[in-house]
Image (cartoon, rainbow, N blue to C red):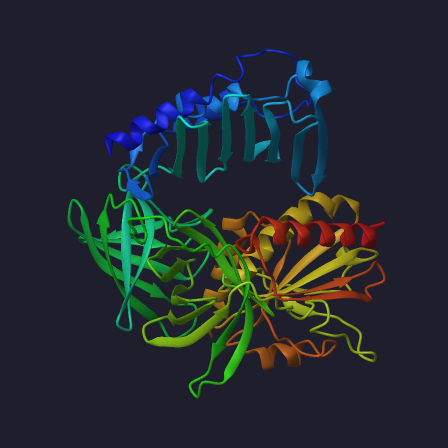
């Protein structure tokens, strides 16, 4: 463990020699300084947990406090955003919605820093990448450093021909305040692992970590020795009892419908992995693969895309379906097996599969008893239906809505608030995790376009039968996500058939969520079925955002 901590420091220092500190004026104004970033992390007392590769073996460290000024030194030392480098780089500065993307591409192979990319959202750094090459007659050195608010990695390959070769890799997970725990849900005969941060000092907090996501359970209360942590977004909660300083026993309760469901849950503190594996596998499953799910008779029930990104043994990704995605899955390749799990506040999923040649043969587990066989053909392409073609508009029935808000007032499309405005209607549920991803996208849309003549309204189809609880769910949904557009209660004890009956202008409701885009004359301009969010990967989600935001621009112009 001590070796891993020292390796991290040595790698960072070895990468610092390429550029010295420079206070030159920036090529691109408005980028956040990395000093501000490290100062903020230091002030918040943010910790890190790391793993490294040593000769093909995976070495884990315990969570520890970090001097972020030292840890992020390569970012500052290797920053090429200075006027003295202007002639050496092609700079591209673009804005997509609330996100700004700046890339620095070297014009010559002689430049050590070949590529630097920075992304910000409302001025906040959300991504940084630097790739460096140093080559001469005697030696070669390659370095790749990547940083996000949830993780960072440093890869360094150095060689002197016939004499020396070194390949080193360190991966760090950035942890919010609290202690790192590894929990397990009991499902069928399986244990489904997750990682979470628990802070019991002062204001109690609990965050479940899935890949690049932190899901909060911060509505807290106590009863005797039981601690309750309610989801920030959904009608679910953990009920936990500390059986010792390092062990927890409890349950997770899901109350999204009138029938409550629960899973037994146990956890141990300071376990630095979700699934443990000891070595870098021979397999690399990065890419998009055709995946199928089978019914009880062995017939194909659903064909999907399994999208994976692998870093050494670590695997992240999701399943993309016709109507959405399985959100952020995280796991490993262990020997000849793929293991993935997630807990997003309303679902707990476990995927296990054997790697057999160019195929995966697995079982999917969800909830207390459900399991289903699935398989994948590696690197086999599959095209899903266009989400714009699944739901169609009626030629004879105009689209409209009329439902109550939390004050008891009926809100209709014919109201003055929507007159001469383009309108996006989200058909959703507060219990739906894909709907949460869509709501975050619509928040970005609302912030960017509301002043230019766009209105957004969400129609909530609840699974419960109590209207009082339903409006509480709506209030929590709006508050936790920072939503300013109205959310109306469309139905209780909802089904897709019931939703379809209430939306006769559409061919049917096959997915929550579904977005309906109306032009300024309130004619249907587009219907987008389902929602595939950030869990599908930057490339997929970026392509959707760019196209959709461009289309919205045409609606309001």
- Give the residue drawn at x 67%, y 44%: 447
Task: Name the image quarter holding residue 189.
Answer: bottom left
Q: Is residue 221 above or below residue 360?
A: above
Tell which of 103 and 14 is nearer to you. Answer: 14
With 56 as the anchor, is 134 left or right in this view? right
Residue furthest out toward the bottom: 297
- Give the residue drawn at x 49%, y 32%: 145
With 82 as the anchor, is 244 left or right in this view? left
With 327 as the anchor, is 353 left or right in this view? left
Tell which of 459 and 35 is nearer to you. Answer: 35
Residue furthest out toward the left: 244
Residue 452 in the image, given as x and y percentages of width and height? 79, 45
- Give the residue drawn at x 24%, y 55%: 240
Residue 34 visible in the snapshot:
yes
Q: Is residue 454 above or below residue 236?
A: above
* Quadrant into which the N terminus falls: top left
Residue 537 in the image, given as x and y percentages of width and height? 56, 52
Residue 448 in the image, given as x and y percentages of width and height? 71, 43
With 540 as the anchor, is 477 left or right in this view? left
Q: Is residue 133 above or below residue 230?
A: above
Residue 255 in the image, given as x and y percentages of width and height? 39, 67
| Numbered marks: total | 0
Residue 68 visible in the snapshot:
no
């Amino acid at each position: 463990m001590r070796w891993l901590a020292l390796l991290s420091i040595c790698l960072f220092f070895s990468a610092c020699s390429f550029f010295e500190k420079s206070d030159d004026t920036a090529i691109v104004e408005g980028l956040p300084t990395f000093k501000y970033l490290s100062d903020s992390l230091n002030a918040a007392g943010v910790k890190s947990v790391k793993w490294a590769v040593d000769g093909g073996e995976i070495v884990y460290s315990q969570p520890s406090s970090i001097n972020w000024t030292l840890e992020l030194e390569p970012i500052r030392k290797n920053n090429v955003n200075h006027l003295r480098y202007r002639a050496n780089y092609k700079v591209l500065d673009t804005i997509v919605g609330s996100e700004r993307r700046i890339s620095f591409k070297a014009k010559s192979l002689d430049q050590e820093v070949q590529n630097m990319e920075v992304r910000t959202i409302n001025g906040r750094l959300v991504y940084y990448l630097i790739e460096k090459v140093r080559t001469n007659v005697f030696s070669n050195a390659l370095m790749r450093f990547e940083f996000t608010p949830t993780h960072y990695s440093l890869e360094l390959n150095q060689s002197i021909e016939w004499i020396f070769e070194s390949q080193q890799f360190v991966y760090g997970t950035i942890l919010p305040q609290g202690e790192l725990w590894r929990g397990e849900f009991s499902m069928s005969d399986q244990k489904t692992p997750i990682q979470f941060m628990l802070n019991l000092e002062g204001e109690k907090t609990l965050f479940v970590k899935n890949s690049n996501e932190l899901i909060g359970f911060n509505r807290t209360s106590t009863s005797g020795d039981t601690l309750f942590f309610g989801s920030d977004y959904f009608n679910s909660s953990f009920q936990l009892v500390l059986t010792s300083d390092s062990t927890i026993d409890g349950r997770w309760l899901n109350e999204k419908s009138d029938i409550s469901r629960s899973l037994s849950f146990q956890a141990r503190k300071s376990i630095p992995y979700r699934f443990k594996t000891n070595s870098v596998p021979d397999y690399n499953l990065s890419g998009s693969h055709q995946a199928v799910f089978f019914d009880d008779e062995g017939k194909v029930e659903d064909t999907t895309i399994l999208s994976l990104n692998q870093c050494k043994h670590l695997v992240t990704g999701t399943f993309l379906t016709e109507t959405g995605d399985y959100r952020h899955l995280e796991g490993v390749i262990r020997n000849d097996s793929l293991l993935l799990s997630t807990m997003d506040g309303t679902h707990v999923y476990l995927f296990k599969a054997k790697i057999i040649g160019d195929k995966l043969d697995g079982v999917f587990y969800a909830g207390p008893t459900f399991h289903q066989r699935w398989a994948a053909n590696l690197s086999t392409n599959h095209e899903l239906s266009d989400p714009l073609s699944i739901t169609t508009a009626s030629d004879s029935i105009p689209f409209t809505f009329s439902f109550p808000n939390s004050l008891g007032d009926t809100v209709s499309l014919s109201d003055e608030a929507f007159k001469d405005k383009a309108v996006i209607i989200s058909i959703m549920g507060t219990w739906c995790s894909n709907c949460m991803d869509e709501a975050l996208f619509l928040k970005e849309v609302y912030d960017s376009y509301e002043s230019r003549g766009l209105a957004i309204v969400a129609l909530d189809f609840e699974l419960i039968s109590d209207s009082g609880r339903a409006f509480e769910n709506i209030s929590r949904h709006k508050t936790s996500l920072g939503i300013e557009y109205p959310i109306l209660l469309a139905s209780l004890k909802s089904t897709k058939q019931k939703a379809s009956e209430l939306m006769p202008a559409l061919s049917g409701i096959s997915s929550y969520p579904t977005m309906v885009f109306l032009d300024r004359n309130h004619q249907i301009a587009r219907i987008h079925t389902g929602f595939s969010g950030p869990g599908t990967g930057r490339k997929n989600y970026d392509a959707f955002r760019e196209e959709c935001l461009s289309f919205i621009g045409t609606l309001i112009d």
